[in-house]
C-alpha cells in the first residue's frame, strides 16, 4: 500500500467516480437492444465521471493544471503540476457491456510523471504507483514477469480502430512479426489496464500506437515502479508526444521493440 496524502486524494476521487461508472455500466446492458444503442448514454457517463474527478482533484489540490480526455487542457495557476485524466479508458468495452474499462489518473510534476492510478470499478482493482514507492494492486506489490524468452511470452497489443485506415497496414506488419515469435497475443481494449497487466506480470509485454497522453500516463508510472521498461514504439522517451508505447521487462522490452521496429 502507498500511504501518502497524494495517493489518498487520487484514490478518493477514483472511488467516487468509479461508483457512478459502475452504476451506469449496469444500465448499458439494458440499452443494447435499442436500435440506437447505448452511445449517448455512455458519452454522458464518461462526462459525468470526468466532472467528478475534476471537481474532487481541484478541491484537494487547487491550482493544478489538467489534461482531460473530454474537456481538453485546463491550465491552472500552479504551472508545475498537471493531472492527466481519462475518466473511462476502454470506452468500446463499456459500450458493449464488457467489464474491461478503467479510470486513469496520473500526476506530472515539473514535466515528470510522479504518480499513477488505474481503477476498474467492476473488479474493484485499484492499481497505484508513486515514483520511488513501488506499484501495487490493492494491497499486493506488483512486479513485472521474469520471462526472458519470447517464445514463452504473452504479449498485449492495441488494434487501430475504424477511421485510422493509414495505421492498419503498419499494425498488420507488426502483428505478424510479433506473432511469429511469441507464445500468443491479446487485445483487450484498454491501454491503461493493459499497462497494469504488464506491471502485474500477467502480460510479458505490450505495445500500441495511436494513443493519447491520458490513455498511458498512469500506466507508464505503474509499469516503471513494478520494475518494467517503457519507451515509445521507436525506442525513445516521447511516449506521450508520439502516442505510442512499448513495455515489458528489460529483456522482453528490448526484443519486442526490435520486432515492432523491424
Ligand atoms: P478510450 O477507450 O478512452 O477511447 C484501445 O486500443 C485503446 O485506445 C484505449 O485505451 C482507448 O481509449 C484508446 N483510444 C484512443 N483513441 C481512440 C479512439 N478514437 N477509438 C478507440 N480507442 C481509442
Ligand atoms: Ca482512453
Image (cartoon, grey):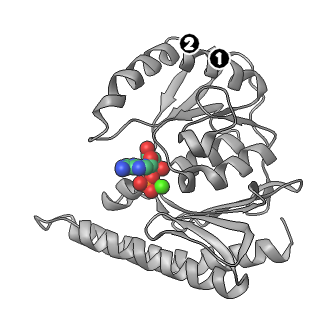
Asked if one can make out residue 189 in the rendered structure from this viewpoint, the answer is: no
Residue 209 location in percent, x, y?
49, 36
Picture quarter with the N terminus = bottom right
Q: Is mark 2 on a helix, strand or loop?
A: loop
Seen from this angle, which residue lies furthest bottom? 59
Between 58 and 192, the one nearer to me in the picture: 58
The residue at 48%/17% (across/down) is 179
Q: In this view, does 95 lie to the left or right of 180?
A: left
Q: Is residue 26 left or right of residue 134?
A: left
Q: In this view, does 3 lie to the left or right of 146?
A: right
Asked where in the image residue 71 lies, by quadrant, the reply is bottom left
The residue at 81%/40% (across/down) is 227
The residue labelled by disc 2 is 181
Q: Is 85 located above or below residue 63 in the figure?
A: above
Circle 1 Cα neighbour tier, 10 Å, few/some/many (<14 / 14–19 / ≥20): many
Seen from this angle, which residue lies furthest left? 35
Q: Is 222 located above or below residue 144 in the figure?
A: below
Residue 153 location in percent, x, y?
63, 24
Q: Disc 2 to disc 1, how far (Cα)?
A: 6 Å
The residue at 64%/39% (across/down) is 238
Picture quarter with the C terminus = top right
Asked if one can make out residue 64 in the rendered structure from this viewpoint, the answer is: yes
Residue 68 location in percent, x, y?
52, 66
Q: Is mark 1 on a helix, strand or loop?
A: helix
The residue labelled by disc 1 is 150
Between 90 and 236, the one nearer to me in the picture: 236
The residue at 53%/74% (across/down) is 18
Residue 241 location in percent, x, y?
58, 44
Asked where in the image residue 36 lies, by quadrant, the reply is bottom left
Task: Tell whether label 1 touches label 2 (CB within 8 Å).
Answer: yes
Q: Earlier in the sequence, mark 2 or mark 1?
A: 1
Amino acid at each position: 500500500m502507498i500511504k501518502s496524502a497524494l495517493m489518498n486524494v487520487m484514490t478518493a476521487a477514483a472511488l467516487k467516480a468509479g461508483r457512478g461508472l459502475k452504476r451506469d455500466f449496469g444500465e448499458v446492458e439494458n440499452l443494447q437492444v435499442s436500435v440506437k444503442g447505448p452511445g449517448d448514454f455512455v458519452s454522458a457517463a464518461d462526462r459525468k465521471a470526468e466532472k467528478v474527478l475534476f471537481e474532487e482533484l481541484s478541491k484537494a489540490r487547487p491550482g493544478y493544471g489538467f489534461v482531460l480526455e473530454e474537456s481538453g487542457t485546463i491550465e491552472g495557476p500552479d504551472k508545475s503540476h498537471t493531472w492527466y485524466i481519462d475518466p473511462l479508458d476502454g470506452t468500446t468495452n463499456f459500450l458493449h457491456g464488457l467489464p474491461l474499462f478503467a479510470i486513469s489518473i496520473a500526476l506530472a510534476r515539473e514535466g515528470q510523471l510522479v504518480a499513477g492510478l488505474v481503477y476498474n470499478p467492476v473488479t474493484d482493482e485499484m492499481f497505484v504507483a508513486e515514483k520511488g514507492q513501488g506499484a501495487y494492486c490493492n494491497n499486493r506489490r506488483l512486479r513485472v514477469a521474469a520471462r526472458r524468452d519470447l517464445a514463452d511470452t504473452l504479449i498485449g497489443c492495441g488494434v487501430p480502430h475504424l477511421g485510422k485506415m493509414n495505421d492498419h497496414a503498419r499494425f498488420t506488419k507488426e502483428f505478424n512479426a510479433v506473432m511469429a515469435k511469441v507464445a500468443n497475443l491479446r487485445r483487450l481494449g484498454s491501454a491503461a489496464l493493459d499497462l497494469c497487466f504488464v506491471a502485474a506480470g500477467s502480460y510479458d509485454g505490450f505495445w500500441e500506437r495511436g494513443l493519447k497522453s491520458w490513455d498511458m500516463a498512469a500506466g507508464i508510472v505503474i509499469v516503471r515502479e513494478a520494475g518494467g521498461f517503457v519507451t515509445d514504439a521507436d525506442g525513445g522517451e516521447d511516449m506521450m508526444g508520439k502516442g505510442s508505447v512499448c513495455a515489458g521487462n528489460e529483456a522482453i522490452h528490448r526484443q519486442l521493440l526490435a520486432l515492432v521496429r523491424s
